[in-house]
Image (cartoon, rainbow, N blue to C red):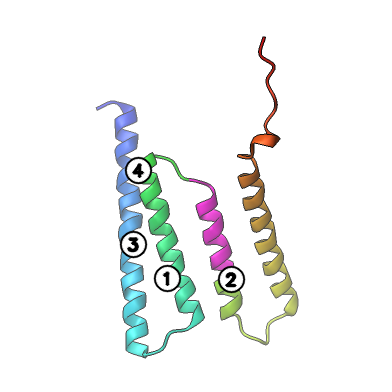
Amino acid sequence: MNVEKFIRLIQVTSVLIILAGAVIGFISEINLMIEKMKVELADLLLLFIYVEVMGMIRVYLLNEEIRITYPLIIAITAISRLIILQKKDLDPSILIYESVAILIIAVAIIVLRLRYLTFLKPKRNYK
C-alpha cells in the first residue's frame, strides 16, 4: 500500500467516525427533545449544525473536497446558538463581540462567493 492510499484510508475513516458522531448526536438530541416534550430554538440550531456537518461529509465523500463555506455556515450557526443560550446577566459587550464575529464570517462567505463572478476575473487577450 503506497502512502497516498494509506493517507486516503485514514481520511475516509476519520470522516466516517465524524459522520457516526454527528448521526449519534442528532438522534440523541431528538430523543432529549422527546423526553422533555419541549423544543427550543437552541435545540433546532444544534440539529441544524448536525445536518450541516453531515452535508459537509457527504460533499467530501462525493467530491473529495470540502467547500470552505460549510464550516463558515456552521460557525455562524454555532455562534448564534451561543448567543441564544447566554444568560441575560452577562456583559453586553460579549454580545457585541459575538455579533461582530458573525458579521465577519458572513462577509467572508460573500467574498468567497464573489470570486466566481465572471466580471471580476481578469480578461485574457488572445492573439
Q: Amino acid at mark 2?
A: Ser
Determine crowd level at label 4: few under 14, some 14-19, many 20+ residues with C-alpha closer than 10 A: few
Residue 93 % position (x, y): 75, 74
Determine crowd level at label 1: few under 14, some 14-19, many 20+ residues with C-alpha closer than 10 A: some
Q: Which mark is residue 80?
A: 2
Secondary structure of residue under mark 4 = helix
Residue depicted at 52% across the width and 54% down the height: 71
Question: In the image shown, does 2 or 126 lie closer to the viewer?
Answer: 126
| Residue identifier under label 4 | 62
Mark 4 and mark 3 lie on one chain; the one further toward the N terminus is 3
* Distance CA(mark 2)–CA(mark 4): 29 Å
| Residue identifier under label 3 | 21
Q: Nearer the viewer, mark 3 or mark 1?
A: 1
User: In the picture shown, does residue 38 fall above or below 99?
Assistant: below
Quarter-of-image position of residue 121: top right
Residue depicted at 35% across the width and 70% down the height: 26
